[in-house]
Image (cartoon, grey):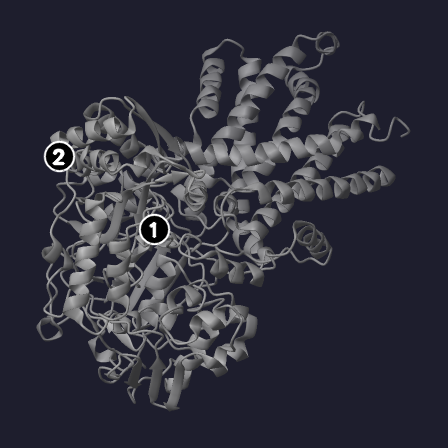
Amino acid sequence: MLKYIGKRLIYMLITLYLIATATFFLMKILPGSPLAAASKLTAEQEAIVLAKYGLDRPLPVQYFDYITGIFQGDLGVSINQFMGVPVTQLILDRLGPSFQIGFQAMLVGTVIGILLGMIAALRQNSWIDYTSTFTAILGISIPSFVFATMLQYSLAMKLGWFPVALWDDGFMSSVLPTIALAMSPLAVAARFIRTEMIEVLSSDYITLAKAKGASRGEVAFKHAFRNALIPLVTVLGPLAVAILTGSLVIEKIFAIPGIGEQFVKAIMVNDFAVIMGTTLFFSAFLIFIILVVDILYGIIDPRIRLSGGKE
Amino acid sequence: MKSSKIFWLLGLVLVLGMFLAACGDDAAAPEEDVEETDVEEPVDEEEPAEEAPEEEATEFVPAEEVPELDEPQVLNLMEGAEIPSLDTSLSTDAVSFNILGNVNEGLYRLSPDNVPVPAVAAEPATISEDGLTYTFKLRDDAVWSDGTPVTAQDFVYSWQRSIDPATGSSYGPYMMSGVIANASEIAAGELEPSELGVTAIDDKTLEVQLERPTPYFESLMSFPLFFPLNQEFVEAQGDAFASNSDALLYNGPFTLENWDGTGLSWSLAKNENYWNADTVNLDEIKFDVVKETSTAINLYQSGEKDRTGLSGEFAMQYANDPNLITELEPTLFYLKFNQERNGEPTPLANENIRQAIAMGFNKQDLTDVILANGSLPADYLVPTDFAFNEEGEDFRDINGDVLGYDPEAALEAWEAGLEELGVEEITLELLGGDSELAKKMDEYLKAQLEENLPGLTIELRQVPFAVRLEADEAQDYDIQNAGWAPDYQDPMTFIDLFVTDGAHNKMSYSNPEFDALVEAAKTELALDPAARWEAMAEAERILLEDAGIAPIYQRGTMSLQKPYVHNLVSHPFGSDYSYQWAYIDGKE
């Protein structure tokens, strides 16, 4: 097991290195200057500023410097959005709110989604099933900004239960963004669990379990649910990363100081170090989650061996 | 472990997928960018939730007529973007300038009537006869927020720092080159920053040597780049300088509080050390960054915020709101006609063709129906309500309108042009922005021109701002929908864009007569305001009669402001607003 994880960690580093390299060069192809005042400056004036950030040097030199910087924990500084602010500080400053909302949304979304999916599967073709399926379709098909706008208008503007926007009221500020963001994991979880459970419930070993006299609840939870979890875990891993790392739309609508909005903005304005830093951070996070998912497989289903069946 | 081999590939795909997902989100966002077209200035790149000022709604109340204020003097505002930098040498954007103008102060400041008046300077500058030496006497009671006096050395240090290539300032070389003696050479690394034409004669006397007479120099002194910096403080802070509200010194009406360097909120508090603190009414101004216009309007409607910008469809929706404020900005949008592309002359090198297009679309309908945000149709280059001569006359009133909508004259010119070129059909590319409004506008222009000028086909090319800039730089377009916001309060900031081979010409427009007038206004007429004014007016007339460009409109903005907010003053350049005279009355 340890050997397996060690090996995987090495692969992770290689993956990250390749992502860093690809992103670095892709980013340099982006059109436009990173300087906010570029439209007004002459080429010479622009060169003075670029020199300050070392962007006047040949690309391979910049690349080498950047990669060595990473190993020293230096991700560079923002050039135009927050002039001179280290990218590590920016990520740390902005991660909290995104992470909090994302975590709450994942928790609420998956728990409710799983419950809905299970009920729907156990009561197939009943009104509960239809309601649950309908909710899932809504969650998948309606973009989160529509939910967010609707929630903001109804629960905050009209009823006044929650703040309209802004991140200054503690937990209350996070409620509406959480609900808006939870719709998508909720829908995904409900759909997967329902489909998988229906399939599992009709399989031979469930019939066997029933024949052996296992109770309805035992069949549902111990056998059917556990097997239905595997595909769900597979999709929820990357989804969790996407949600935990912030949503541009939700953060904009609720005026939350999150990382998601920052990342997209950085790409738009060619803030090189910020693009690199956030991409690397998101990638590392994603790769880590994939590892966790792989380990979880083994826990959920002992048939899946971690190291080629040696255990 | 066969699967591990493709593991990293999978990871890569997923990460790239995230990129795409992020961009996809962006496209789905409602009213992402409310710009008509991005102005060639970073300042205008982001202002969905920005507040626009009042002019028509409420009159300015002079200090002696301000009523007894017994309510909490707290103003709640929003900005459309975060603060990129409050280092006066480095800032280039509207949000930063807006704060700097309220927490710091230069030699001059713009009055409520937008006239530069002495601020840190105790009295108007003494100007030498040749117009090249300005001597400023500083106020004795001007102090920094830590109590140390503001001295002439603070200005010398700040300006030298901004022009020093090691600082990496964008606006330092941009604003000082050709204005302050030796600035260009220092920026190019040929001279030392200490050789800049600015000297502290003593603690309270500052002498500035100019490169050439600059009639608008005093108004420049209200621009944040020319604000003072306390050398001891800046050097003690080192890299941390200006990284948060504690790492700054203030000498203006307010001090900045609760800004962590990357956050979405901050506040301004009254600066009791400010020499003119008696005139400041507000105790606190709370700011939050709200990038989504609909959210900003919701916060305004729910009473949390006192003012909100209206953009896009919201401008129309609130057109009859009693608290609506419409304001005209000195930002002008126009079509650039590229006369030479890839070394070949384009059909636009023909003056009749340019005339035809310039007169061939209805600007009134464009501003009334498509934009509907208080913008004015423009038959001119230098904006209205922007530059005034010594008698206070608007430059616009002197020169009048030149190039207007006239479908019949357009058709006549069009046919003459086609004949001269010996063709019956012309296809031209129209380069424009990719925001919703910019697209709508360019489609309107296409429809109008194709209808009024038979044989013309317009192909639309809608690209992000950065791409448009690159195309402009490479002169890779036929017609471009462009805009310009002023850098200083003088018609020249618009007019000299189009001199032959000018850095912003980029369309091969060249008229020796125009060049000569601009040159004369900058040199031999610089000390003769009336003649200089006349030369600039003549130059503008020539440019438009040549149809070098085709003016479209002057931008207006609309916003809602609670009726209890008074004396919030807006400015045409530098800091957008002054809060020092503002007060709250009638809220409760």
Establish whether labels 2 and 1 are both on one chain. Answer: yes
Classed neighbour count for the residue bearing mark 2: other residues with Cα under 10 Å, few (<14), some (14–19), many (≥20): some
Give how far apart the Cα atoms at labels 2 and 1 are. 31 Å
Where does residue A271 sit, x and y in percent of width and height?
53, 50
What chain does badge 1 belong to? B
Q: Earlier in the sequence, mark 2 or mark 1?
A: 1
With respect to residue A186, does B392 lie above or below? below
Q: Secondary structure at mark 1?
A: helix
Kind of residue at disc 1: Asp
What chain does badge 2 belong to? B
Quarter the N terminus of chain A occupies: top right
Residue furthest to the right in view is A310
Quarter the C terminus of chain A occupies: top right
Where does residue B365 sit, x and y in percent of width and height?
16, 34
Q: What label sits on residue B44 in the rendered view? A: 1
Q: Which residue is mark 2?
A: B406
